[in-house]
């Protein structure tokens, strides 16, 4: 694949062959949580393998504005598995920030900090960029208010104006399966009186729960219910090497799956079972998937190899969509090359991500010649389609950019979650 930089546009040309071994940047979801929980712990935590993208930098900047000291550490972690940068966190207790906290493009930063700050002793305003200002926040504001939180929003959207206050734990039945909302409520629960229980309509990523347990919180999980009991003991500090981001890796896995004989090996990637449904979906479509789990501690990780074979279409419902929510754009790129109609239903949440991902993928893939049918809560793709080059718009959404690039095109906004994306693309694609 050849790459040419034209200002903010990247041109990606079709590859003859794709092969290689690579690592991806650290997991964003784990990084946000480790930094935030590290800021609440008793003593200094050290987090390495942080991803370089803007989202995690937004969390770091917000924590600094709240008075948390974060200082760089040498990037090589003890296990030698993760790369990226590292931070030592010295929690000093939060202080009221001078201006609004800028969560930039990061919904995880905003929702998790809303949970932490609701029961704190400080006041703060959480704001973000134009895309974040359009995203729904009532899902986190309303249950926090039921715990006693003082939060104002602009009609259920950012900015969120919080005044920290005493909270009361309660039982929440989530109407939308969301790891961000679950995490915000558990973080609020740390400071609340009485237990906080979250019941999920479908299983979502459990990184917060794993970290809380590792840091000594009194937390129990059973059949879609998480219960946190406040403890008088503070959380222990942690040392954590963040594994590679499975969702970033999914674009490479999708690329390898596109053609029989193409193959990619990804080392040091996070393999938390609440994140890896995409591997089962690729297998169901016909790709060969090999997984080698490393000796695992808090967050499972290891090596994944995906090799392309003739593909067939799949049908996914709401539960599978939740389990692979960030991988659906990559999956749609793969579906263009699968025999038959791939149907994705129960996916309305994709419309309220960093962009409307159903509309963005439908539009981009259609321009490339794919046959797409879009519905309010889903999308279907008829394959296989011979895709042609086209100019597409990623709507400023990193995952749309990467998915369309994998389908063969250009992008201009990959710096959000994966700045090295195009450099790696050049390394693994071969002209002959
Ligand atoms: C995330 C949860 C998911 C996911 C997002 C990261 C997290 O969002 O799409 O990229 O770190 O908790 P929702 O909680 O809105 O489903």
Image: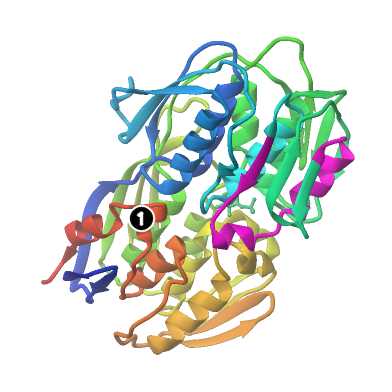
Q: Is residue 408 above or below residue 190?
A: below
Q: Considering depth in this image, is 94 or 1 the residue closer to the camera? A: 94
Identified at 32% across, 47% down, the residue is 266
Residue 49 in the image: x percent, y percent? 37, 33
**Circle 1 Cα neighbour tier, 10 Å, few/some/many (<14 / 14–19 / ≥20):** some
Q: Considering depth in this image, is 38 or 374 the residue closer to the camera? A: 38
Residue 228 left/right relative to 376: right
Image quadrant assignment for residue 72? top left
> Considering the numbered disc 1 on the image, is that residue within a helix, a strand or a loop?
helix
Residue 271 is at least partly visible in this image:
no
Identified at 24% across, 60% down, the residue is 425
Q: Total marks drawn? A: 1
Residue 12 in the image: x percent, y percent? 24, 73
What residue occupies the far left of the structure in this picture? Answer: 432
Residue 373 in the image: x percent, y percent? 58, 86
Magenta run includes residue 283: no
Colour mode of the rendering: rainbow
User: Residue tagged by mark 1?
Assistant: 415
Residue 376 is at least partly visible in this image:
yes
Asked if ligand 1 lies within 8 A of label 1, the reply is no
Q: Is residue 218 above or below residue 309?
A: above
Q: Considering depth in this image, is 318 or 174 the residue closer to the camera? A: 174
Q: Which residues are magenta?
A: 124-150
Residue 99 in the image: x percent, y percent? 58, 39
What residue occupies the far front of the structure in this picture? Answer: 98
Residue 138 left/right relative to 268: right
Where does the N terminus fall, quadrant-wise? bottom left
Identified at 59% across, 57% down, the residue is 132
Magenta run includes residue 134: yes
């Amino acid at each position: 694949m050849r790459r040419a930089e034209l200002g903010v546009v990247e041109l990606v040309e079709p590859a003859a062959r794709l092969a290689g071994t690579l690592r991806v940047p650290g997991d964003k979801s784990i990084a946000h949580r480790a930094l935030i929980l590290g800021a609440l712990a008793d003593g200094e935590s050290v987090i390495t393998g942080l991803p370089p993208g803007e989202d995690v930098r937004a969390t770091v900047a917000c924590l600094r504005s709240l008075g948390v000291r974060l200082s760089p550490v040498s990037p090589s972690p003890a296990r030698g598995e993760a790369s990226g940068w590292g931070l030592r966190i010295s929690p000093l207790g939060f202080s009221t920030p001078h201006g609004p906290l800028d969560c930039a493009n990061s919904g995880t930063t905003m929702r998790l900090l809303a949970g932490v700050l609701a029961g704190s002793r400080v006041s703060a305003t959480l704001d973000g960029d134009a895309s974040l200002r359009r995203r729904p926040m009532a899902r986190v504001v309303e249950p926090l208010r039921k715990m006693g939180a003082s939060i104002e929003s602009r009609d259920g959207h950012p900015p969120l104006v919080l005044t920290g206050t005493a909270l009361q734990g309660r039982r929440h039945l989530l109407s939308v399966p969301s790891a961000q909302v679950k995490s915000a409520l558990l973080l609020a629960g740390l400071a609340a009186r009485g237990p906080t229980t979250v019941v999920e309509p479908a299983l979502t990523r459990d990184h917060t729960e794993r970290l809380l347990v590792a840091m000594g919180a009194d937390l129990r999980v059973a059949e879609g219910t998480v219960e946190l009991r406040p403890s008088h003991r503070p959380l222990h500090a942690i040392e954590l090497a963040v594994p590679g981001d499975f969702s970033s890796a999914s674009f490479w896995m999708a690329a390898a799956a596109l053609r029989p004989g193409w193959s990619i090996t990804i080392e040091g990637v996070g393999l938390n079972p609440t994140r890896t449904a995409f591997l089962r979906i690729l297998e169901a479509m016909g790709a060969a998937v090999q997984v080698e789990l490393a000796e695992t501690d808090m967050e499972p990780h290891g090596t994944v190899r995906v090799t392309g074979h003739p593909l067939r279409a799949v049908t996914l419902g709401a539960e599978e969509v939740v389990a692979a929510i960030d991988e659906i754009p990559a999956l749609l790129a793969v579906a263009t090359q699968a025999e038959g109609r791939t149907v994705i239903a129960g996916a309305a949440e994709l419309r309220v991500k960093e962009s409307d991902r159903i509309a963005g993928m439908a539009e981009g893939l259609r321009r490339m010649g794919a046959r797409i049918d879009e519905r309010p809560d889903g999308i279907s793709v008829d394959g296989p389609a011979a895709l042609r080059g086209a100019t597409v718009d990623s709507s400023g959404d990193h995952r749309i950019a990467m998915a369309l690039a994998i389908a063969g095109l250009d992008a201009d906004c990959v710096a959000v979650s994966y700045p090295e994306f195009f450099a790696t693309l050049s390394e693994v694609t071969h002209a002959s």
